[in-house]
Image: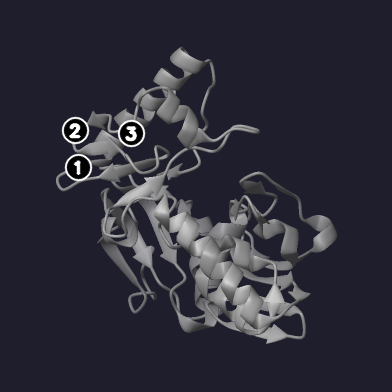
Amino acid sequence: MSLVKDFEHIAKRAEPLAPHTWFHLGGPAEFFAEPNTVEELQALVRRCREQGTPIRLLGGGSNILVRDEGVAGLVVRLSAAPFSEITVARQTVSAGGGAKLGQAISTSVREGLAGLEALVGIPGTIGGALHGNAGSRGGDLGQWTCQATVMTRAGEIQERTRDELVFAYRESSLDELVILRAQFQLEQDDPEELTKRMQKQWIVKKASQPLGHQSAGCIFKNPRGMSAGMLIEQAGLKNTRMGQAEVSDRHANFIIAEQGASSQDVLKLIDLVRDRVLDRLGIELETEIEIW
């Protein structure tokens, strides 16, 4: 039985993935699906399990570099409304795994709930942000998470309570296939003050990052107590090029993919930066970006 049989209304073959990522690079997905309901997603997951087909979840695409040859198996994107709902009840914000992190932040600020505003400017979906425990100097998403609903690779839906969740720097125990929904327990605060704090944070963050029109991604995790960007700059690597990929001169932990760049250009530049920082500073950088 074909993987897409009975799913023709939501699945397609050879979908280009470049338009779905911030780098705008990489080859196609063998199969690509955007289910409309949890039930459709569950049926797809079970079909993949039956057929031994690899399956991946694509969120906002800000933390993904797709190889030039593309991705085998099924790539799923949770773009439908049921996966993106955001609701507020007292001090708890509930957000679907496909919801934009930025929308969850603006909703919480508007409702006078503090905690998430320190994460403003971080791209991606709730699911992706929780999986990698997105954060900034003001904290991380995990510290506010009180519950998560997940789907396993067998298609089973399970609840994870706060005492079952473990969060660390840019990682979490939420490694199931799909994060369907999460709840965040926040603190009451003045909406006007929250808005001011959020706007200030946004201005500071955007001033140091590549320009909005550039296809760029943040590459390395910060080693404990240090800034990856500062280490790369200290190693003299700003503006270093490999093909049409270049280390940003605004923030050295970003690589810019210029017109005509390939994923291979970016991968070679990542290896070069890692090797030079290790050679010159004795520190081994670990990639934050996922390479498919």
Q: Place residue 264 in its image quadrant.
A: top left
- Disc 2 to disc 1, C-alpha distance: 7 Å
Residue appearing at x 46%, y 62% in the figure:
203
Q: Secondary structure at mark 1?
A: loop
Residue 139, position in %: x, y?
A: 67, 54
Whichever of labels 2 and 3 marks the residue nearer the N terminus, that label is 2
Q: Secondary structure at mark 3?
A: helix
Label 2: few (<14), some (14–19) or many (≥20) C-alpha neighbours in 10 Å:
some
Viewer-proximal residue, 108 or 266?
108
Q: Which residue is mark 3?
A: 267
- Can residue 124 be seen here? no
Whichever of labels 1 and 3 marks the residue nearer the N terminus, that label is 1
Residue appearing at x 53%, y 23% in the figure:
284
Residue 18, position in %: x, y?
A: 27, 55
Cβ atoms at labels 2 and 3 below 8 Å apart: no
Q: Which mark is residue 243?
A: 2
For badge 1, the amino acid type reads Ala
Whichever of labels 2 and 1 marks the residue nearer the N terminus, that label is 2
Q: Is residue 126 above or below residue 106?
A: above
Viewer-proximal residue, 32 or 191?
191
Left/right of residue 218 with respect to residue 130 in the rendered view? left
Q: Is residue 219 above or below residue 268?
A: below
- Disc 1 to disc 3, C-alpha distance: 11 Å
- Disc 2 to disc 3, C-alpha distance: 11 Å
- Can residue 110 be seen here? yes
Q: Is residue 42 above or below residue 229?
A: below
Q: Which residue is mark 1?
A: 261
Label 1: few (<14), some (14–19) or many (≥20) C-alpha neighbours in 10 Å:
some
For badge 3, the amino acid type reads Leu
Left/right of residue 163 with respect to residue 179 in the rendered view? right
Q: How many marks?
A: 3
Viewer-proximal residue, 216 or 281?
281
